[in-house]
Amino acid sequence: MSTEKSNSMQFWLVVAIWFVVSFLILWFIGGACTNPIDGSSCLASGALDSLRTMPIVGLLLPFNPWNSLMYFLAPITGFIFAFILIRWWNQYFETTEAASPIFLILILIALLAGYYVNLSFYMGEAASLNSRNGVKYSLYFCITESDSDCYTSVQKVNNEYIAQAQAANATTIQQLIPIAFWAELRKSMFLSFVLGAIAGWVPLFGLWLMKAFKESQE
């Protein structure tokens, strides 16, 4: 067996092992639920509650357990999506740059921007439907604030809008609908997809580091 073929087999073995390990880690973070249909019998429910209030670390932990089959499929899809995209990019453009941290950051920005657009369309429709009888609703996004903090901040602005409209005898009152972006993300299965995508990047990043190290030694 040639060295190149042996190295290829070792790489795919590492990828397969990491795929299983990363899925189990995300499954544990999601509560380690044993029923993929309704998310019942969660073995690790509440196990990470102490970490959810920690800065940065807490922001990456989901609020909800894996309470449907889609939660189980999301990290698998994210892993495959990132792994195939990065390998295709490197092979098509004959480069290794797609396995670098910079490319991962670009992927994450694109994914989060896509979720922002999706949330904007969904909530924007609700704002449009409720804009009647002298009230005009628009969206207000909070980035890292919790639901309660976002609501409190927006409520102060809404009260100010009401006071201004009353003082000016306006026929239409501007009101904002609070949307805590990161809190919404942590409540959705999309975060599991994003974490799966990060997991899919890891083995390719490791391969990229090994090649960069070998080139530096030559």
Image: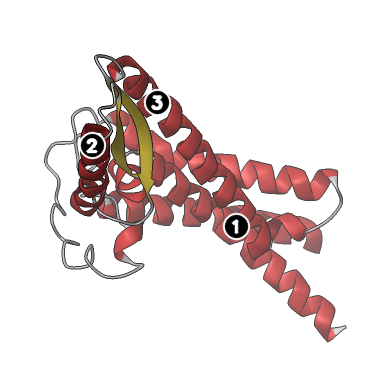
**Residue indicated by mark 3:** 124
Q: Secondary structure at mark 1?
A: helix
- The three-letter code of the residue at mark 2 reads Ala
Query: Which residue is pictured at 59% across the width and 44% down the height?
Result: 110
- The three-letter code of the residue at mark 1 reads Ile
- Percent across and percent down for residue 130 are 28, 18
Query: Which residue is pictured at 13% across the width and 36% down the height?
Result: 40
Q: Which mark is residue 105?
A: 1
Question: Label 2 to label 3, Cα distance in Å?
Answer: 28 Å
Q: Secondary structure at mark 2?
A: helix
Query: Which residue is pictured at 61% across the width and 56% down the height?
Result: 104
Q: Secondary structure at mark 3?
A: helix
Query: Which residue is pictured at 67% across the width and 56% down the height?
Result: 103
**Residue indicated by mark 2:** 167
Q: Is residue 118 above or below residue 210?
A: above
| Image coloring type | secondary structure
Residue at the front extreme of this rendering: 168
